[in-house]
């Protein structure tokens, strides 16, 4: 499957991760208090991802999903759309997105640790102050 602006290898990775999510029991559950939102198990963090069904076949993932932020499609949204039989309309929506250019920096850095490139855990020196 091709989606404009997204490399084929990235699309394949999204689809394989989505298939793993869908095949696992209880990896997708309804979000409390919302008919249009679902919680999806996260492989990288402790908190699940919140996927919301919008209008016109659109699904959104939370701000913690770097793939969603960079490409407007991720394994979480694909898994939810597939689980409620709306995957074709979601893919059609994503293919028609105008002005939704892919952030290559976001794609490259999507698996980068949050503090990469920074010194870790050292307190700054405060000159002239005694400890």
Image: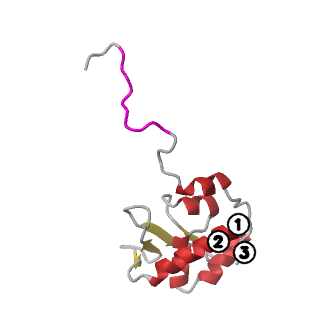
First of labels 1, 3 by sequence position: 3
Q: Residue 114 at x, y = what percent?
A: 48, 48
Hey, which residue is sitting farthest bottom in the picture?
A: 85
Magenta range? 118-127
Name the chief secondary structure element in magenta: loop
Q: Are marks 2 and 3 in contact (CB under 8 Å)?
A: yes
Inspect this view and state whether residue 14 appears: yes
Q: Is residue 124 magenta?
A: yes
The number of numbered badges drawn on the structure is: 3
Would you name the residue on which mark 1 appears?
A: 7
Please give left or right for residue 98 compared with residue 23 in the image: right
Left or right: 19 in relation to 27: right
**Residue appearing at x 58%, y 59% in the figure:** 69
| Residue 20 part of the magenta-drawn span | no
The residue beneath circle 2 is 11
Q: Picture quarter containing residue 48? A: bottom left
Label 3's element?
loop
**Residue 126 image-quadrant placement:** top left
Q: Nearer the viewer, residue 4 or 58?
A: 4
C-alpha gap between disc 2 and disc 3: 7 Å
- Which picture quadrant has residue 87? bottom right
Badge 3 is on which residue? 2
Rendered location of residue 53, percent (x, y)? 53, 74
Front-most of 107 and 80? 107
* Mark 2–mark 1 CB contact (< 8 Å): yes
Q: In percent of the image, x 56 and y 57: which residue is there? A: 110
Q: Residues within 10 Å of mark 1 (few under 14, many from 20)?
A: few
Label 2 SS:
helix
Q: Is residue 53 visible?
A: no
Q: CA distance from mark 2 to mark 1?
A: 7 Å
């Amino acid at each position: 499957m091709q989606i404009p602006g997204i490399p084929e290898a990235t699309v394949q990775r999204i689809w394989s991760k989505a298939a793993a999510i869908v095949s696992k029991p209880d990896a997708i559950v309804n979000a409390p208090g919302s008919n249009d939102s679902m919680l999806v198990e996260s492989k990288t963090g402790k908190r699940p991802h919140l996927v919301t069904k919008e209008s016109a076949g659109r699904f959104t993932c939370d701000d913690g999903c770097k793939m969603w932020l960079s490409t407007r499609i991720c394994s979480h949204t694909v898994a939810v759309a597939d689980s409620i039989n709306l995957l074709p309309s979601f893919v059609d929506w994503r293919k028609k997105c105008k002005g939704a250019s892919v952030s290559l920096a976001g794609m490259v850095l999507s698996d980068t640790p949050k503090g990469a490139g920074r010194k870790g855990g050292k307190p700054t020196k405060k000159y002239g102050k005694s400890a």
